[in-house]
Every structure is written in C-alpha cells, then in structure tokens.
Image: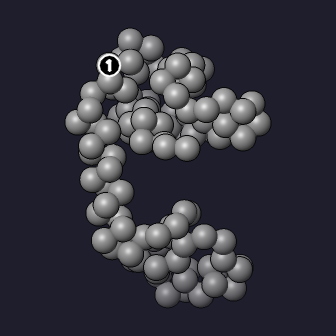
Amino acid sequence: PNTALAHVLLEFALEKGGWETQNRLSEVLFRHYFTDGRYPDEKNLLNAGEEVGLPVTECTARLTRPELVKHIYDKDQQAKQRGVNGVPYFYFNNKDFKMSGAQDPQTFLEAFEEA
C-alpha cells in the first residue's frame, strides 16, 4: 500500500511523544495491516493514532496537509539518491554500511567492529 500518510503520522508521533510513541504507533500500524487486515487509509490511521494517545484533531490536521506528504516523498527521494533501496537499512555510529534487508549475524558483527 501507499504508506506516505502513515509516515506523516509517524513523524508526528515522534514530534509529539518521542521515539517511544513513534515505536508504539509503528507496532499498531503493523498489527492493523498484517494481523487485522486494515488498510492504512485516513480513518484507520486516525484510529491508530488515537490508540497510542495522539490527539485525533491534531492527527487529522497533519494528514490533510499536502506539504507534509510532499516532505515524505522528498525524504524518500533523498534516501534513494544515497543508495537506500530496501528496509531495514543500517547505519552504525553514523556510518553508512550500505546494508539493507536481512543480514546474517556475521555481517552485523563485522559492521559493529568496523563502526
């Protein structure tokens, strides 16, 4: 699905409640989609935001601002220009290891040692 609006909401969660709130929202969004079969449309995104304690009126205001969606697409384009082509993508100690997707444990150990 198109996840631009979900990313708008995730950025709002980080701004409003810190990484803990953003992480809880991420978990709710995954559960909604993969377990409950709920498409990340505006209604379901508002429900997810409310579930983690975000004010619905503020969530609505964020989700209806086209410039915030554009910001998400711009960030996506910037990541692609840096070579990010999959998720998760890994940085360690602010060093880009150009690692994306599943990796074996040895690859992580080598990256940790180099970082």
Q: What residue type is disc 1 on?
A: Ala
The location of residue 21, given as percent across then percent down, is 51, 33
Give above or below for 15 relative to 96. Answer: above
Please state the horizontal and vertical placement of residue 60, each as a whole percent of the image: 38, 18
Residue at (55, 80) in percent of width and height: 112
Identified at 71% across, 79% down, the residue is 105
Could you tell me which residue is drawn at 61 percent across and 32 percent down?
Answer: 39
In depth, the one of 30 and 39 nearer the eye is 39
Give 110 or 79, whichever is nearer the viewer: 79
Q: Is residue 102 visible?
A: yes
Q: Nearer the viewer, residue 73 or 54?
A: 73
Quadrant assignment, res 80: bottom left
For label 1, count other residues whose C-alpha is less than 10 Å away and answer few (under 14), some (14-19) or many (20+): few
Q: Residue at x 35, y 64 (%)?
A: 79
Which residue is identified by label 1?
A: 61
71 with respect to 27 (left or right): left
